[in-house]
Image: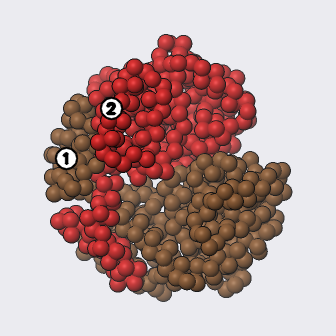
Chain colours: A red, B brown
Amino acid sequence: MQTDPSALVRNVNDLVEGLKSGDRRAIARLISLVEDGAPQASAVLREVYPLTGHASTVGLTGAPGAGKSTIIDGLVKRMRAADMSVGVIACDPTSPFSGGALLGDRVRMQEHALDEKVFIRSMATRGHLGGLSLAAPEAMRVLEAGGSQVVVVETVGVGQSEVEVARQADTTIVVLAPGMGDAVQAAKAGILEVADIFCVNKSDKEGTKSVARDLRGMLELGHGRDVDWTPPIIVTSATSDTGLDELWDAIRSHEQHLRSEGRLEARRRERLGFEIREIVGERMKQALDQAAGDAFEKVTDEVLERKIDPYTAAAELLERFGLGSVSP
Amino acid sequence: MQTDPSALVRNVNDLVEGLKSGDRRAIARLISLVEDGAPQASAVLREVYPLTGHASTVGLTGAPGAGKSTIIDGLVKRMRAADMSVGVIACDPTSPFSGGALLGDRVRMQEHALDEKVFIRSMATRGHLGGLSLAAPEAMRVLEAGGSQVVVVETVGVGQSEVEVARQADTTIVVLAPGMGDAVQAAKAGILEVADIFCVNKSDKEGTKSVARDLRGMLELGHGRDVDWTPPIIVTSATSDTGLDELWDAIRSHEQHLRSEGRLEARRRERLGFEIREIVGERMKQALDQAAGDAFEKVTDEVLERKIDPYTAAAELLERFGLGSVSP
């Protein structure tokens, strides 16, 4: 790991030059730096961020095994047919993209691996303090700066950070499949509200119709994040390439919808606000160890001895930072 | 939702009185307040925290469908047989405890529902800014203050916040099952490192042996969080109540291990440090909206227009708080 600041900046600058000329190794290296977290991530973002803002982003979330990566595989084909270059970030550790694959899946993916205009990368975020919520959008920007016109992010729809990452895309697809967590369970997990498009996959299996029906019932009860957009329910069988044309059409319709009346800008503004808040929150956590070193140890001891509770401890630390007015 | 501070404090005080006398409705109400997030959560914790510190806590994590709640069901039976009162917090939205159940499962759970010494509660954390990582330990403390001698928390082993919650328990059990995400996938998801005990469930199904063997191989490669403790691998078939005595024995052995040489205290200290950091981070995020209102809008606009990047924006905001030295 790079720690000398000036060497880091030189290194990042070299890699960004490579990135601009579409060097795949530079893209891969920059994403690795982002995974390491700050100061690497902030050095990368400073250079990469100005190069971004034009790509469309698509978030796909759903339970493990719902078929997300097979769907992405089919979407990538259609994006390529429309002559768009595509980047994919897979944050589902059980995804075939991440190597946790049946042989058949892996072979299918390799079709794209030979395509210069497709970049697929799985994401590990152990080093990044902000975890997935910061690392994923940064990696997506590296892909965009490297030339991807569409960037797809795949996450597991059972973790709150994971769902949040998918929600931060321009268009968010929630994938459901019969038996893999039905619509009612997805509602409990809070993933219905984030959907711009629903994809009910595995239409060859029993139960697809009832999942779609339950979903329709719940939508009538007022789920959905955008009053002017009723999320379509697309039924697919990704393994047999059925319904994916409709799904791709739905993505493009949603993009059209966003591009009218300033909706896209409003959504991106909200996303950036979320991201800036996250960065500030993470920096404050780090600052506690540095600036408040001894004080932090001391209040933790007091909490351990049950003299004070964790909220009071946090308030005392904020007071030391001159932030008493922010007390819990 | 309660917003008048003095009414909130009176309300919390009344509920805590009820809690001390073991009133189940008071427990339920306090957990609901915790789910709402601050200021409710901090008011509750101030009263409840001094009453805690004696219960053992057990975290169970694993993929949806691995059989976690059936295992907990069997463990609760054994805890009750040892005359311990038990509290369970279920954070898996697909868990039978949360209502996402097959009929058979629900009926089984209701056995405990009639037992005054068992309190099972599923957790929703929409309102809590800190999400699961703050709400779950707070709810566990409410259960403890209400008389639970063991508190079990169940989370999905595919989300980073969710795994972290299970890791914060005294004893963390990682549940694997053949076909539900094998050992290699669990390794990729980063959940092997958090385990004090492995439970390979569904021993009636094919593949259990290979999961256990893979796991053993990986343990030899140095996974594990405690150099003095090799996580045992317990093979169970929870639906037929097989192996659960061994699992319960392993939990008690690990507790014995922790109680020697100050290990338990060290672990709890680390957990509290994590929690205090989280609270401070959350407070800072809130403060951005309050204290930095206009400044926050302004830098967000600059980021949207790509004049600056999100890290630079965060640095500018920290500067305004007099925290320039904490710059990203």
Quadrant location of the C terminus of chain A? bottom left
Chain ID, mark 2: A
Q: Which residue type does callout 2 highlight?
A: Asn
Q: Position of residue B132 (x, y in %)?
A: 46, 59
Q: Say if mark 1 contacts mark 2, CB within 8 Å.
A: no
The circle drawn on residue A13 is 2
Q: Which of B28 and B143 is in front in this view?
A: B143
The circle drawn on residue B316 is 1
Question: Around disc 1, counting alpha carbons within 10 Å, would you say few (fewer than 14), some (14 to 19), or many (20 or more)?
Answer: many
- The answer to whether B32 is drawn above or below residue B315 in the figure is below
Visible residue check, residue B290: no
Name the quadrant containing residue A292: bottom left
Of helix, strand and loop, which one carries label 2? helix
Of helix, strand and loop, which one carries label 1? helix
Q: Position of residue A134 (x, y in %)?
A: 39, 44
Q: Where is residue B191 in the image (x, y as percent from the top left)?
A: 59, 56
Q: Which of A144 and B29 is in front in this view?
A: A144
- The answer to whether B116 is drawn above or below residue B283 in the figure is below
Is A152 situated left or right of B157 in this image?
Answer: left
